[in-house]
Image (cartoon, helix red, strand yellow):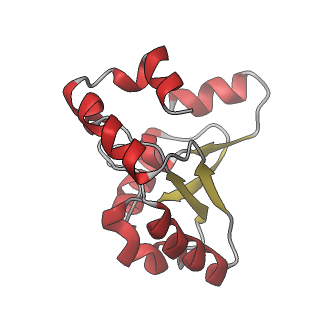
Amino acid sequence: ATATKAAAAGGITTIVGMPLNSLPPTVSVDALEAEVAKAAAEGLHCDVGLWGGVVPSSLGSLQPLLADERVLGLKAFLSPLPRSAGYEAVHPDELRTAAKAAASAAVPLLVHCELMTTAEMEALQPDITADPNASRRFATFLATR
C-alpha cells in the first residue's frame, strides 16, 4: 500500500511489481494469489501490474501462471544471486524453456542479462553463498562483467 500511495502522490498512475522482490516470490499461481490478496487487504492507490518470476523450480508451472490474465509476462535473472534473495538465477538452457512459455502465451520475457559462462557462475557462487551481501559489492559487479 505504501508503494502505490507514494506513486499516486507523485502523479504516477500505474506501477508494476517485480515478481522476485515479492514475499513469497511470484513464481506460482499460489504465490500470485497471496500477492493479490495482500494488496487487496492493504488497499491500492493506483493501478498495479504483475510479472511472473522464472526460477529453476518454477519452469514446470509457468503455463498455469501465464494463463492468469493478471500476469503481464515473465522475469528472470541470469547472474548468480545470494541465497538470501529467496530464489535462484536460471541457466541459459532454462531460459530457453521460459522463452518458449512466454512466446506461446504471447507475453514478454524480461531478463537481467548479466550473462556469464557456467564456469564463471560456478566460480562466483561460493563467494555469494559465503557472503550474503556479495551482490551489493562493487567487486562482485566487476567480476560479473
- Residue 137, compared with residue 75, is above or below; it is above
Observer able to see residue 33:
yes
**Foreground of the two, 55 or 141:** 141
* In this rendering, position of residue 92 left or right of residue 28: right
- Image quarter where the C terminus lies is top right
- Residue 33, compared with residue 84, is above or below; it is below
* In this rendering, position of residue 101 left or right of residue 134: right
**Foreground of the two, 65 or 82:** 82
* In this rendering, position of residue 140 left or right of residue 75: left
**Foreground of the two, 63 or 39:** 63
Residue 104 position within the rendered picture, expressed as x and y whole percent measured from the top left: 63, 84
Observer able to see residue 22:
no
Task: Identify which residue is drawn at 49% across, 50% down.
Answer: 78
- Residue 70, compared with residue 35, is above or below; it is below
- Residue 49, compared with residue 17, is above or below; it is below
Residue 103 position within the rendered picture, expressed as x and y whole percent measured from the top left: 66, 78
Extreme-right residue of the structure: 11
Extreme-front residue of the structure: 119
Residue 74 position within the rendered picture, expressed as x and y whole percent measured from the top left: 56, 61
Task: Identify which residue is drawn at 51% across, 41% down.
Answer: 43
* In this rendering, position of residue 118 left or right of residue 98: left
Residue 46 position within the rendered picture, expressed as x and y whole percent measured from the top left: 67, 40
Extreme-top residue of the structure: 138
**Foreground of the two, 7 or 143:** 143
Task: Identify which residue is drawn at 20% across, 27% down.
Answer: 130
Extreme-left residue of the structure: 130
